Amino acid sequence: MHHRDDTETCAEQLRTALEAHGITLPPLTVNLPTFAGAYAGSPLVSLGNCNEETARALTAVLREATGR
């Protein structure tokens, strides 16, 4: 069983890591219906939508992290 606090901590850690690279995903939240059994497995963290500039920044950070 997953605890909401664990998932919220995960979402906050992701938010902090993205912000360290100047990336903000404002709708980054815990998807509460996934705790009600609507999703078989781990609860979901909703990343939401982002504009093209944010998507490109996120892509650049991930590529840099993998050396590509």
Image (cartoon, grey):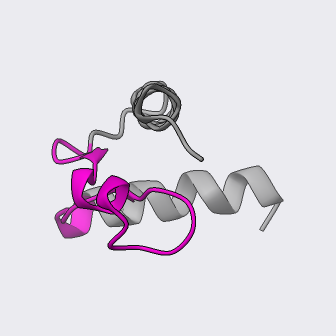
Q: Position of residue 14 (x, y in %)?
A: 49, 37
Is residue 46 one of those drawn in magenta? Answer: yes
Q: Is residue 68 above or below residue 66?
A: below
Asked where in the image residue 4 lies, by quadrant, the reply is top left
Residue 16: % across, % down: 45, 24
Residue 52, above or below 17? below
Determine whether 57 is above or below 41 in the image. above
Q: Give the mark count.
A: 0
Residue at image coords 57%, 51%? 61
**Residue sitting at x 17%, y 48%:** 27
The residue stretch that appears in magenta: 25-53
The answer to which image quadrant residue 60 occupies is bottom right
Where the C terminus falls, by quadrant? bottom right
Tell me: 2 left or right of 67.
left
The spot of residue 5 in percent (x, y) is: 44, 25
Which residue is depicted at the point 57% across and 68% down? 41
Q: Residue at x 37, y 66 (%)?
A: 37
